[in-house]
Image: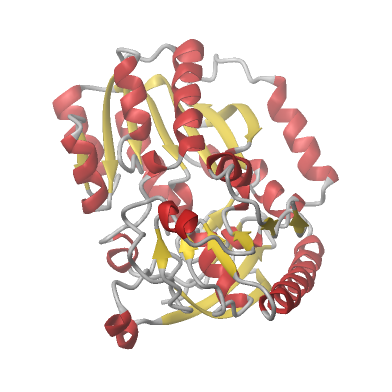
Amino acid sequence: MKREECRACKSKKLILFLDLGKMPLAGGFLKDLNAMSFEKVYPLQVYVCQECSLVQILEIIDPEILFQDYSFSSSTVKPLIKHFKEYAIWLKTKYNPEFVVEFGCNDGILLKQFEYLGIKNCGVDVSENITEIARKSGLDVITGYFDESAAESIKKSFGMADLVTGSNAFAHNDDPEILIKAASCILKHEGHLCLEVMYAGDLLEMLQWDTLYHEHLTFYCLKTITVLLNNYGFHVIDAERIPMHGGSLRIVATRDSKQKVQTSVSKLLKYESEKLLSNPETWRNFGQNIGKKIEVVRKTILNLSKNNRIWGYGAAGKATLWVNTCQMDYLEAMVDASPLRAGKLMPGTHTPIVFPEELKANPPDYIFVTAWNYAETIKSNEEWFNGIWVTPLPDLKFF
């Protein structure tokens, strides 16, 4: 199914600026070669709204397909553990909430930090296999969608929330208004809505085209999300760029008009104006630059593969895009520490995914780090490796 109007402002003035053809789902890992006959591909096209500047993918994949056996467990990624520990402390220091609700809570990586800080909490996530992990660790987590019905249920059990948060969860929802309405339902009037979203500014600046896959439906700039939140009585009081996932936007909003708006908001809006994030031509140029970058990486790594053994590292969504757009069926293996992925096959190329221990047993000449945003952490974990590391973004780099 394909949307015909913008998710934020309902405009039909949508401009296609990047067409990656048909792609398998980023998390569509195959259990074995027998599953190949069931593998599907879907159009992957990226648009920008002329009215509100929301960058978005209009093709909608059934959430039951995307999330029923979800392969991303946040607690297996060391930099994310550090991020959410710092985020929890930041929230407690700034807003000192007594009760927090998190939507898109994954395996409870942030909720655990609230537990350590003595903050009452409850989480919601649509992925049954992931929420089961969270519940086994003793957390209050609901499997399902964060909508007004879920909010009412939580309110009945726990009371009104001082703070509602979601990290990279907005991007996974076709209708962001459902999330905002749910937050409105359970938040105290003076409470705070704290969001971490995929940021269009970093998408543009870092050429992060490899985050553009079917799970990630939206990439916000501050201007866009401000308009969306204003429609439901929220106003943004704080905003900052954060390094999570290679570049994200953290915003804090409230319905309490007495709360002071920080200067960070106007500064970021000025940056977005200077970078012409609202100009469709900016995004057309981005699309052209991405096509050139993909071709450079494709040719370079293909030439290397003729006389060298190459493995990949990091079987996340980014990996699916790189190996399929660059036709990297020559990779011997893809390394990943997550038990939800290791032992399976990459979508599209069917490259075997292996645990890091197998890398040490049979080291290649080159490692192509698809999870380039965690390259330093990966390299430090594999200090013994004497071959050459390669990262494709922000620029093709050998080290």
Q: Is residue 182 above or below residue 343?
A: above
Image coords of residue 390 (percent x, y):
69, 58
Residue under the image location 56 percent in, 69 percent down: 321
Q: Is residue 22 above or below residue 71?
A: below
- Residue at the spot x=52%, y=28% of the render? 253
Residue nearest the viewer, comparing 372 with 102: 372
Is 1 or 4 nearer to us in this picture? 1
Q: Quadrant of residue 269?
A: top right
Give the residue drawn at x 14%, y 27%.
157
Residue 278 shows up from this direction? no
**Residue 145: image location, x then y, percent:** 27, 49
Q: Is residue 288 above or below residue 180?
A: below
Front residue (pair 7, 109): 109
Q: Viewed as shown, does residue 7 lie left or right of 184? A: right
Which residue occupies the extreme right position in the image? 274
Query: In x, y percent, where is residue 56?
Result: 57, 62
Residue at figure coordinates x 75%, y 56% from the top left: 398
From the top left corner, tell me how far across and down residue 80 is, in percent. 48, 36
Task: Judge left or right: residue 161 versus residue 224.
Answer: left
Single out the residue that lies furthest toward the bottom.
Answer: 37
Q: Is residue 272 visible?
A: yes
Q: Quadrant of the N terminus?
A: bottom left
Number of marks in the rendered image: 0
Q: Nearer the viewer, residue 177 or 24?
A: 24
Asked which colour scheme the image uses, the reply is secondary structure
Judge from the rendering whether residue 43 lies leftward or rightward of residue 346; answer left or right. Answer: right
